[in-house]
Structure formats: structure tokens, C-alpha cells
């Protein structure tokens, strides 16, 4: 039995909960959603998929993304919810060795972007928020760190986790990184009506940082579009859309919108990837749909 999940904070916590509830010892298999969508993931009988699209070979599935809904029977839980971890916590509620309620509550808020302005601007004052920002894909040696987090979060409270030398070093790096990221956002983001468009596609190494910061820098925007090169393949563009968490004016279900371009996600946050030869066609279409701001549900 393997846990198959994605390398974000919700995925980390999913793995923590499943390891404890089911006493799973095997290493976590980390997979990006587009790999599963394209049928390229090695999913085997006995696997538990969490926070990813469904795949026929799995034995259990837990997910909460709007565009991942299926119309067949399966073992597990699918429901539109703040986090996949919350669904797992509810499903196995009587099988945990310790109380994870605080961890799951924090994961719900972080994954659904239910954050205050102060939490966005000063994440160093909020342990779980800061910790979540140390988890991102594309870094060298990322799997070693993700696996370490699964282990130490499962055995310690948040203050003990933050005192781990590796975690502490990464948290300090995140604080420095966020300051520079603010500059990158200001220099590479433009406004078209109520849509902020952050174009990082000319960077060989995409700037990384606080994903919520753009909403505080461009408060008049309802939605942000970020364009970047896929780290594993410079011929592939990645596009991320996110409703502003401070200006609730976007009526577009961005998960449904990007499903038409080979992607998907939530109503308020979604992503897709496509060959850069399609950029001149796809990107203006996506921007225009966001500018029109009509409900697509």
C-alpha cells in the first residue's frame, strides 16, 4: 500500500494522516496532477490517491478539487471542501494516535486561502502559514524534505517542527525570498481591467514566493493570472489562476475555465500546462474570459 499525493502543504498533511491511520511504512509517491491527468503516473492496486485526480488502478481516493469529480463508485471520499486532508481526517477519525485537529484546521485555511491580510504580509508570525511556504515543487532534493516533513509533523507540534534545523533554515530563506518576490511581482505584473497578469515566462528560473502576496499588491484586481515556464521542460508553459482573497469580485469558475485548456482545479484556483506554441491562442482567450467576468457554471 502506497500513499500517492502531490507536493503541496495539503498533500504533506494528507500523507501525515494516512501514514498514522493506516500504519503505512512505504515511502510516499509524489506526483503532480497533470501527470495523473495525462495517464503517465504509475498507479497500482493498493495505492491511496489523495489530493489528485482519480485513476482507475487505485484502491482508495480522497480529493476536493471541483474539476476532478467523477460519476462512478469508488472507495474513499470526494467532496468540495477546504482541503483533502480534512476529508481524510473525517474518514479515519477514530484511527489516529494523536490529535490533529489544529493541523487540519490550519490546512483547511491555507489550502482554501482563508487568510487575513496580516497572515499574508507577515507569515513569519504564523507558524503553519510560514511552514506551508517552505513546500513547493521544482527544487533540487525536494522529495527528501517533503518526506522529512511528513515524518516530523506526524510526531511533533508546530513549535517543535519549526525548531528543526532544516525547517528553520528554510523558513528563514522563505522570509528573505518573499521580500525579493515582492519586487519581481511589481516589475512583472500588469493590470487589464480587474485582472492582474504576472508574466514570468521570460525567466529561465521562475521566481518563487508567497502566492498570496499579489492580491495585497494589486487590491483592485479580482483575479490573478501567472504565466511561467514549466521547470522540467522549457517548451511547456504553466498558467495559474487564482481569485483574489481580498476582493471577491470574480464570477468565473477558473477550474472549469482551465478544464477547456487541459487543466483544472477549484472554483477559485486552478492551473494548466500547454506547449508554448499555443500561447498566442490560449492566453488571450483566457484573459478575455476573465475580463468579461461572466459566470461559467
Image (spheres, grey):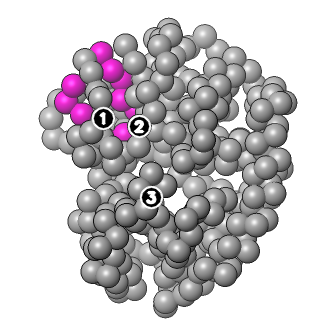
Give the side of residue 99 with respect to residue 86, left or right. Answer: right
Whole-Å distance between the Cαs marked 2 and 3? 15 Å
Q: Please report contact status of discs 3 and 1: CB closer than 8 Å, yes or no.
A: no
Mark 3 lies on residue: 230
Mark 1 lies on residue: 41
Q: Which residue sits at x=76%, y=66%?
A: 180
Secondary structure beneath dot 1 equals: loop
Label 1 crowd bin: few (<14), some (14–19), many (20+), radius 10 Å: some
Whole-Å distance between the Cαs marked 3 and 1? 18 Å
Secondary structure beneath dot 3 equals: strand
Q: Quadrant of the C terminus?
A: bottom left
Secondary structure beneath dot 2 equals: loop
Camera-nearest residue between 190 and 292: 190
Q: Which residues are magenta?
A: 46-57
Please report whichever mark, 2 or 1, sits nearer to the chain's N-terminal start: 2
Q: Is residue 138 above or below residue 76?
A: below
Camera-nearest residue between 161 and 181: 181
Does residue 154 show up magenta in the picture? Answer: no
Mark 2 lies on residue: 31
Q: Quadrant of the N terminus?
A: top left
Q: Which residue sits at x=59%, y=45%?
A: 139
Q: Nearer the viewer, mark 3 or mark 1?
A: 3
Give the side of residue 208 with respect to residue 267, left or right. Answer: right
Q: Is residue 289 above or below residue 145?
A: below
Q: Which residue sits at x=27%, y=46%?
A: 37
Q: Please report contact status of discs 2 and 1: CB closer than 8 Å, yes or no.
A: yes
Q: Position of residue 23 (x, y in %)?
A: 50, 8
Amino acid at each position: 500500500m502506497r500513499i500517492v499525493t502531490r507536493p503541496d502543504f495539503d498533500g504533506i498533511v494528507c500523507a501525515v494522516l494516512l501514514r498514522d491511520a493506516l500504519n503505512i511504512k512505504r515511502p510516499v509517491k509524489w506526483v503532480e496532477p497533470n501527470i495523473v491527468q495525462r495517464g503517465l503516473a504509475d498507479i497500482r492496486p493498493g495505492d491511496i490517491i489523495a489530493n489528485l485526480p482519480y485513476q482507475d488502478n487505485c484502491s482508495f481516493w480522497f480529493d476536493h478539487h471541483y474539476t476532478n469529480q467523477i460519476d462512478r463508485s469508488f472507495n474513499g471520499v470526494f467532496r468540495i471542501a477546504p482541503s483533502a486532508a480534512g476529508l481524510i481526517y473525517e474518514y479515519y477519525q477514530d484511527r489516529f494516535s494523536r490529535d490533529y485537529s489544529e493541523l487540519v484546521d490550519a490546512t483547511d485555511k491555507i489550502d482554501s486561502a482563508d487568510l487575513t491580510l496580516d497572515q499574508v504580509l507577515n507569515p513569519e508570525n504564523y507558524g503553519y502559514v510560514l511552514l506551508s511556504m517552505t513546500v513547493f515543487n521544482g527544487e533540487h532534493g525536494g522529495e527528501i524534505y517533503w518526506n522529512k516533513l511528513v515524518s516530523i509533523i506526524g510526531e511533533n507540534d508546530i513549535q517543535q517542527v519549526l525548531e528543526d534545523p532544516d525547517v528553520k533554515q528554510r523558513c528563514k530563506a522563505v522570509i528573505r525570498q518573499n521580500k525579493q518576490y515582492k519586487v519581481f511581482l511589481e516589475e512583472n505584473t500588469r493590470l487589464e481591467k480587474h485582472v492582474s497578469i504576472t508574466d514570468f515566462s521570460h525567466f529561465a528560473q521562475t521566481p518563487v514566493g508567497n502566492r498570496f502576496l499579489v492580491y495585497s499588491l494589486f487590491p483592485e484586481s479580482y483575479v490573478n493570472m501567472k504565466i511561467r515556464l514549466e521547470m522540467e521542460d522549457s517548451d511547456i508553459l504553466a498558467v495559474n489562476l487564482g481569485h483574489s482573497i481580498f476582493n471577491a469580485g470574480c464570477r468565473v469558475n477558473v477550474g472549469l475555465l482551465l478544464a477547456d485548456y487541459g487543466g483544472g482545479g477549484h472554483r477559485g484556483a486552478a492551473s494548466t500546462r500547454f506547449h508554448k506554441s499555443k500561447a498566442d491562442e490560449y492566453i488571450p482567450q483566457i484573459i478575455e474570459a476573465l475580463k468579461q467576468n461572466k459566470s461559467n457554471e
